[in-house]
Image (cartoon, helix red, strand yellow):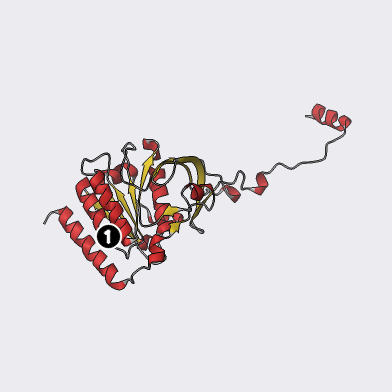
Amino acid sequence: MSTAKATLSALRQRIATIEATAGTPGVASSRSRIEIDRDCVDAALGGGLARGALHEIHAATGADNIAASGFSLALAVAAAPAGKPVVWVRQDYAAREGGGLDGDGLAALGLDPAALILVRLRDPLAVLRAGGEAARCAALGAVLVEPWGEPKALDLTVQRRFQLAAEASGVTVLLLRPGARPMPGGAETRWQVAAGPAAPMAMNAPGHPTFDLTLLRHRHGPPGGPWRLEWNRDEKLFKPPALLRDPAAVPRLEPAAPPAERTAFRLAG
């Protein structure tokens, strides 16, 4: 048995185990929307990101691939109901270009590393097949599918199958496209992501991950953005970044000194 077939077989067994121990989701939970920011982005999407649908994510430049991965994972965290695992199917080349996953990094975004099922495969066709298997499993929280570049196998028919599988299972499918140009397809939404500057927190601690987002396509409405939003892992929500987080950095406003005192101060300096 080839490595790809063995990996796909192992994924099927894992999914079967998850399905055997999970309950069946209700219609309301599978058809609800995912809150993004409770503000302008949700308004542009008609109330939030559609759950149980296919969404496509592109990096603005090659240097933004990590930001696009982080945004995709944040969406998966927001989409996944509590206790349901997330499946991430990556092509090996995408993993080499975008970097490996780190448990501390996953936790920093709000995902328990134990809740992630990571599948790595060599060729894009195997990635798409494994992603299709996962998309049909209603017991999963979300599915990320990450082929590299523009494989011929990822045509409109395959994208339509992803969309139909997501609709039937209620599972949100995120198609991450490193090394690919935004092209017409079957996704519910298409996003472009760039890394934004993170505002430092108190004591100069690293700020929340910040993303510059553009909605390139929305099946049921016009494009939108750009928006700059930061990810809050505790609330599982994106928010506009604060302009200034460290109160100690606020300049103190002292009463104006009399002219004579100001002159003396300048001379003494």
- Measured as percent of width and height from the top left, residue 157 is found at 23, 46
- Measured as percent of width and height from the top left, residue 96 is found at 29, 44
Q: Quadrant of the N terminus?
A: bottom left
Q: Residue furthest left?
A: 1
Q: Is 171 drawn above or below residue 261 in the view shown?
A: below
Say whether residue 202 is left or right of residue 261: left
Residue 87 shows up from this direction: no
Badge 1 element: loop
Q: Quadrant of the C terminus?
A: top right
Around disc 1, counting alpha carbons within 10 Å, would you say few (fewer than 14), some (14 to 19), or many (20 or more)?
many
Q: Residue at x 79, y 41 (%)?
A: 254
- Measured as percent of width and height from the top left, residue 19 is found at 28, 68
Say whether residue 165 is left or right of residue 106: left
- Measured as percent of width and height from the top left, residue 98 is found at 34, 43
Quarter of image, res 179? top left
Query: Badge 1 is on which residue?
Result: 136
Q: Nearer the viewer, residue 66 or 168?
A: 168
Q: Nearer the viewer, residue 63 or 147?
A: 147
Q: Residue at x 39, y 60 (%)?
A: 31
Say whether residue 197 is left or right of residue 124: right
Amino acid residing under circle 1: Arg
Q: Nearer the viewer, residue 223 or 179?
A: 223
Residue 60 shows up from this direction: yes
Q: Residue at x 39, y 67 (%)?
A: 83
The total of numbered circles placed on residues is 1
Quarter of image, res 185? top left
